[in-house]
Image (cartoon, rainbow, N blue to C red):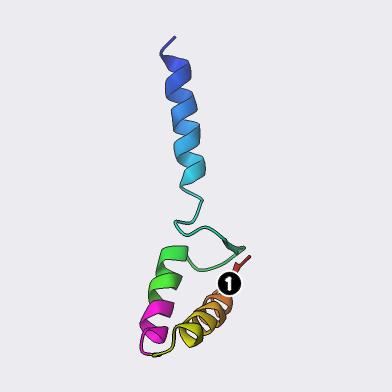
Amino acid sequence: MIVRPACGFSAIALLTACATTDPGWTGSGAEPFDQALADCHTQVDVIPEQVGREAALDRCMAAKGWTRG
């Protein structure tokens, strides 16, 4: 039957819409992921050291409701 594959595909599409594009981040009641990540990158991209950028990104994302696990 054609209806079943279409329903299954629709369910998968809806579930993946809730996932982030970057694995390892979780958030409950957080800002939209893409918006939070873009805002944080704008703030931390001026930091010259990679380690400093990563730590600052984690702090910024945590302030927006996201944690990396």
Question: Total label count?
Answer: 1
Horizontal and vertical percent position of residue 46:
36, 89
In the displayed orientation, state which residue is furthest to the top. 1
- What secondary structure prevails in the magenta region? helix
Determine the residue positioned at 50% across, 84% down.
51
Residue of label 1: 65
Q: Quadrant of residue 49?
A: bottom left
Q: Amino acid at mark 1?
A: Gly
Horizontal and vertical percent position of residue 59:
56, 82
Determine the residue positioned at 46% across, 84% down.
53
For the residue pair 31 and 58, the one nearer the viewer reads as 58
Determine the residue positioned at 38% across, 73% down.
38
Q: Residues within 10 Å of mark 1 (few under 14, many from 20)?
A: some
Q: Is residue 61 above or below residue 34?
A: below
Determine the residue positioned at 51% across, 50% down.
18
For the residue pair 5 and 55, the one nearer the viewer reads as 55
Q: Secondary structure at mark 1?
A: loop
Q: Is residue 5 above or below residue 23?
A: above
Q: Quadrant of residue 6?
A: top left
> Is residue 11 part of the magenta span, yes or no?
no
Q: Is residue 41 above or below residue 13?
A: below
Q: Quadrant of the C terminus?
A: bottom right
Horizontal and vertical percent position of residue 42:
36, 81
| Residue range (magenta) | 40-46
Q: Quadrant of the N terminus?
A: top left
For the residue pair 30 and 61, the one nearer the viewer reads as 61
Horizontal and vertical percent position of residue 64:
54, 75
